[in-house]
Image: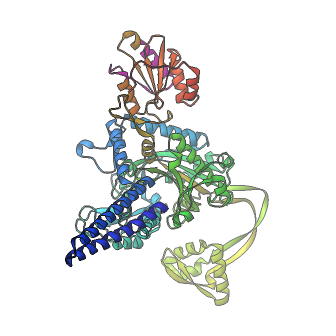
Amino acid sequence: MDPTEQSLRQSLSEKSSSVESQGNAVRALKASRAAKPEIDAAIELLNKLKLEKAAVEKQLQTAISSSGNGSLNREAFRQAVVNTLERRLFYIPSFKIYRGVAGLFDYGPPGCAVKSNVLSFWRQHFILEENMLEVDCPCVTPEVVLKASGHVDKFTDLMVKDEKTGTCHRADHLLKDYCTEKLEKDLTISAEKAAEFKNVLAVMEDYSPEELGAKIKEYGITAPDTKNPLSDPYPFNLMFQTSIGPSGLIPGYMRPETAQGIFVNFKDLYYYNGRKLPFAAAQIGQAFRNEISPRQGLLRVREFTLAEIEHFVDPENKSHPKFSDVSKLEFLMFPREEQMSGQSAKKLCIGEAVAKGTVNNETLGYFIGRVYLFLTRLGIDKERLRFRQHLANEMAHYAADCWDAEIESSYGWIECVGIADRSAYDLRAHSEKSGVALVAEEKYSEPKEVEKLVINPVKKELGLAFKGNQKNVVESLEAMNEKEAMEMKATLESKGEVEFYVCTLEKNVTIKKNMVSISKEKKKEHQRVFTPSVIEPSFGIGRIIYCLYEHCFSTRPSKAGDEQLNVFRFPPLVAPIKCTVFPLVQNQQFEEATKVISKELTSVGISHKIDITGTSIGKRYARTDELGVPFAITVDSDTSVTIRERDSKDQVRVSLNEAASVVSSVAEGKMTWQDVWASFPHHSSAAADE
């Protein structure tokens, strides 16, 4: 906890005790009919103590707000952003005229344009620059695929039910809300209790269902609306179930991620890539999750766009040839040790983090660096972006390491990108389930002599002993790793039999010496066959876009100073409209010049909007600022025009023929506004700006 906050909470606790003690003293004096001057003096001291307590309360509230925990400021800011986004049709609730459905949203024209620009830059930054293979797979996925990947059994969130109404709630959300509200609104809690709540928030992802249920009971948390008691937490599968074909005999699901489409196509993609590793495949597409209680607008929805990369690499060599391009980058990182000990994220150099083993390998570190560059170039504030390492129990059992790019918003720190080393889990799982080997090969320059484990089940003896279960026992014996097999061999030689657990039968069986032969043989091999590891960066596009909206939103006073005007300070890269063009006054000459500029902007691929409404130039500027348009061309002559930059409100004068190329150069990053400002005459507009 922040030392200032801790000290103020301690001080407030002491002041509260003093007020209570002095209040008791006043009541005792009144009850004993003490002299009036004595009672008046006691009351005066009580009032003084109350004022001191109120002053400490005010200081504590300020400290909480300034440390980013102040909910009132955040909620007011969020409401201003959301109101602007919905009014200007960036996005709206889906099926609005039918009262909508929670967790589903429509993108309007400017929202579609921002999303298109973000995805276009994602393709440029990752697929083109890293020479990735792009695929596009169906959203409907057969059950067998998601059974192999583990989603059918494990893709769950913990849910609790209102015991009287049956309404469902996410268990971790209720605990998070309780702790957050206590920290932000209850000034009476002790410094120790505040530290406990902060610790719960830090390690909540690590809780088992039992631990989560115990905390909910300990804090007396009830259903939010009814205050009814809640059930124990239990897992709820988040996938939308469906069936494929009119008979309904092929069960399926709407995909919860795009990754599985890449994994099942590995063999063909590997062949397409000339049987060479490493290589990466990427996919952008819709994914679906049946959220228990969607909230937080675009941050938690039931249908959303994912952009995912599966980078296949040799598990024995996870170095990256371009790691030096990012190794000197320094940004906020939050390793698991710091989280568990209650510290904050600190700036670390990614090269040092990899060298020290904080980040598992170079390829994982390379993608963390590339994700940092992608997000900051979009317009995410680098001081409100951190990379948080998964805690031990939070991480999938097969993962070697996993980091989330988290962006701070009015909702707190939001996971927007997951960057995981998933080891070889996915390809192995699909190989076993499908019977198709999803492997890579490394040819040796010279044959190598290797010692190979050979397990030969004696099917005749196993058939006599296990009859219909023979196949299960054979498969389990053949699947043993070297350590298990050599231990079995030693036990069989010393005792003649061994107890052996067969997972598909879920029981132990007795294996005798005559049922299996286990040995090691020396063989010459010309190549090594292995299952590649996978490094997976997975981007929640809607979440990134919402955080971008908040990071780019600001207000500034109008010229008259009588109102606050909304501005989205989007970088030209992602702005929904790059430029507006309007004649200063309604005049045929100016309107003809406007059409010429519009045609030239279209020819160089610059999105723009013409405004001939005739309202004041200041109001037209304000309208486009609220849409985040970075440049405005005002036609006030048939030979030259002014170009205004949104953030500085500075204007330059350029010839009519140069206008489109100047805007195009800045919008595409070939020039900066500073370059334009230095190259062209400055214009002091006679027309009122705002």
Residue 605 part of the magenta-drawn span: yes
Residue 237, quarter of the rendered image: bottom left
User: Residue at left 54%, top 43%?
Assistant: 376
Tell me residue 314's x, y (percent).
66, 56
Tell me residue 148's x, y (percent).
49, 62
Residue 246 part of the magenta-drawn span: no
Residue closer to the observer: 284 or 88: 88
Tell me residue 467's x, y (percent).
50, 79
Magenta residues, start to end: 592-617
Tell me residue 115's x, y (percent).
44, 39
Does residue 440 appear in this view?
A: no
User: Residue at left 52%, top 66%?
Assistant: 340
160 is higher (above) or lower (below) than 250: below
Residue closer to the observer: 309 or 387: 387
Residue furthest right in the image: 446
Residue closer to the observer: 337 or 442: 337
User: Residue at left 53%, top 25%?
Assistant: 664
**Number of marks in the image?**
0
Quadrant housing the C terminus:
top left
391 is higher (above) or lower (below) than 104: below
Residue closer to the observer: 318 or 502: 318
Quick check: 656 left or right of 101?
right
Quick check: 615 left or right of 500?
left
Does residue 57 appear in this view?
A: yes
User: Residue at left 28%, top 62%?
Assistant: 224
Quick check: 76 left or right of 519?
left
Residue 225, quarter of the rendered image: bottom left
